[in-house]
Image (spheres, rainbow, N blue to C red):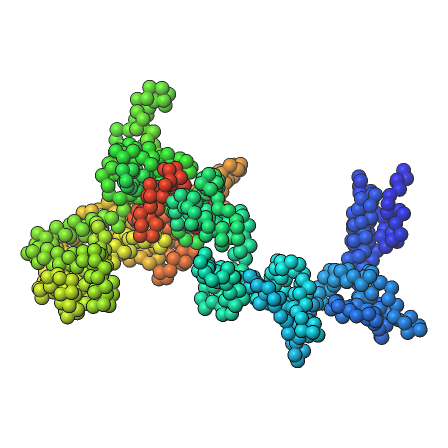
Amino acid sequence: MERSRTAFDHWMHKHYFTFRDTRGRNITVQCNLCLPKINILSTARDSTSNLKKHLECHSPCQMRKRQHSEMSEPEPLFLPPKRLKSVVWEYFGYLKDPGGTILVDGYPVCRMCRKKVSARAGNTSNMMHHLRDHHPKEFAKLNCHSPCQMRKRQHSEMSEPEPLFLPPKRLKSVVWEYFGYLKDPGGTILVDGYPVCRTCRKKVSAPGGNTSNMMHHLRDHHPKEFAKLNRKHSVACRKRIRDAPSSDGPSNYGPSILENQTEESSDTKDAKADPTIYYQTQSRLNALVFNFIVEDVQPISILEQPGFRKLIEALSRGKKVMNRSAFVTRLDVAFDKMKGELKAKLDKVQTLCTTADIWSVQDRSYFGMTCHWLEDNLERKSAALACTRIPISYTCETIIAKIQEIHSSFNIESKVQATVTDNGNNFVKAFKEFSSEDDQEVEDSRFEDLGSILCDGEMGGDFFLSYFLPPHQRCAAQTLNLIASKDLADAVSKGPTGKLHSSATAKCAAIWHKSHSSVEAAEAMESIAKMTITVPCLNKWSSEYYAVNKLMSLTDSQLNELTEALGVTGFTPDETAYLTEYTDVFKPVAFALDLLHGEEKCFLGIVIPTLLTLKRKLEEKAANTRLFSKVIENTVEAIDSRFKQVFDSSDARLATATMPQFRLWWLPEDEREALRAQLITEVVQVDQGTEETETNGGSVHEDEFFSYGPGSSGNKSGKREAAEEVWLYLQGTNKDLKCLNEFPGVKKVFIKFNTTLPSSVPVQHLFSNGANAVTPKGHHLSDEQFERVLLLRYNSKITTALE
């Protein structure tokens, strides 16, 4: 059967190809020019465009280059006799006829590939495109010789460039520093609406005094001058507002901006200012204002304040500030985006911990929760999950319900390793009554009919509350602070030095009160002590310790001068000696508190070594102190009592064992073998869990199901490999966390148990802006808006909701 005719059959260049086959609406051909390489091409039956492109890209230019290289003396090319402005003519020219006349036919020849390019009426666009597409190196060199650069060189070669003058009318724009007009032979300034650039001597259209084209010329051709112009313009705006003449002034015409801006600002920040700040779009301005309110937790009412609106409109050159309704709409959209991104991140996380706390401010109570996890590179990530309003008279059932509600809203119920809270009675009672941890008694367990439970509700609502409740982890930082502020303080006050302690601390408190309530007293303290005296925070022992330590760092003469200037009773030698010994003996306690207050590089595995080291250092101090031996004994007993659950916790012990900084060195010799066996078991379990996750949902072959016989990878083989990995890890001495990359099984166990934080400090940061507490009433926000603003602000580092 004879094939139907196609566009290829009538094509003038079909001799470069050999017809191969017809495939539906396309045909396939083989290029003869690419031989011996076999190059099969496809094109439509009614088109040869693909074949034309192949010829243009692969054959003609290459053939012309080869012909040009084979010519011993290529025919010279000449420039046309007219004046040429474009530097592209360096790469093109015309041939001459036998009579010596240049053949200016509108098709100049490329000097590299000898190809003719259409350039009718002197238009050089096609010549530029040819260089860009076929000779990129020459095109890059050509950009270095732009007209502005050539005019600069011509201008620099002129010994005395013709001076430029400003028009005789009053000028408002600072852009005139870079432009001017020429004078005619009679000395008159030629204000023809085409000022000349002082940098490249190019004329720019500026009809009617409009300076837009002049600004665009600087922006496009002289970016450095344009950046300087923007800095001067910002200074000019401030100066014009400050020096604006009053209604009874002598004249309505003050000095021009050019006269006022002869000197540049010395501010180094202005030198780095973004020159595009005045060219922001309205949407970008709205985003900046929205970010300003969210990041600094500003009141929404600021959008309606006239001063703020005038400021933004002046800085943005007339653009409008969004109103309250627009802000609320943008807040809802940003919050939904943030929550969606956060859910997507948490779906990929295997293990995480949460921290929870309750604040009561202005007759309102808020329940806050954050979550934390470790990335594969062991970097800790944090996110805020909620800061929602709860009844002021909340109960432990309210707390448990809120924890479950937040966990389920982010689908993390099964991923939470522990929930860290403070030692408040409501939290302790809630987790004690509804906890589902493994230490509950199981002797009375029995099977129940699920249908009867669902229908009759025999188990009650508490059954469902307790089912997904995560394990409870008390805040180690607050527990140690409780030991220092209560147990230690009680031991000091009841001891033989109780009166001495009371009198010494009372004088310290008087100094702190004076510095806090009187500016003159604070200035006197700074002039005498050469430092700012710290006022301790309430219920924070370490803050009081550092405040006392700072006072005791002063000399006796400075202390006496300070107490006299403030009108406070001076310290006796016994009081000074007591406070000095107090700060020396209990310095390890303050250091341990600082360690446990960390977040990014603080893990559960640091708690036990910190407490053991603290006990050892206090016992060493007891041998050298004459006043605090009994206090130290009581403090060590309080540590053993209050942290007994942590010392006995297998999770905390495994978390410590998987930290390269400690391994098993902190344990007595007789206990190391048991913990090593436990670590091996955990490594085997996490490896099996990873394999199950990878194969979940796929079909399992019969040979893969059974693990008997030669060649099978049974549990014994996996345990042998885990034991070898754990042994190599425990023999190592590298204390850097990065060494865990060499032990993948131990690293997984580390992530599992050290995801838990030792303190609930991060959730407290959710409710504060720097050192100031954030409250909804003070910012005119509803409870829902307040929560959304706080969550957006806290999660701005891990989501893109704030751009």
Number of marks in picture:
0
Residue shown at the point (24%, 45%) measured from the top left: 645
Quadrant location of the N terminus in the rendered image: top right
Q: Quadrant of residue 152?
A: bottom right
The reply, left or right, for residue 128 in relation to residue 1 is: left
- Is 73 in front, or is 322? 322
Residue shown at the point (37%, 21%) measured from the top left: 451
Residue shown at the point (12%, 50%) measured from the top left: 490
In the image, residue 395 above or below residue 383: above
Residue furthest out toward the right: 99
- Residue 423 percent across, percent down from the top left: 24, 43
- Is 169 in front, or is 280? 169
- Is 398 in front, or is 507? 507
- Residue 235 percent across, percent down from the top left: 48, 62
Residue shown at the point (53%, 47%) measured from the top left: 283
In the image, residue 219 above or below residue 698: below
Q: Quadrant of residue 258?
A: bottom right
- Residue 579 percent across, percent down from the top left: 14, 61
The reply, left or right, for residue 178 in relation to residue 536 is: right
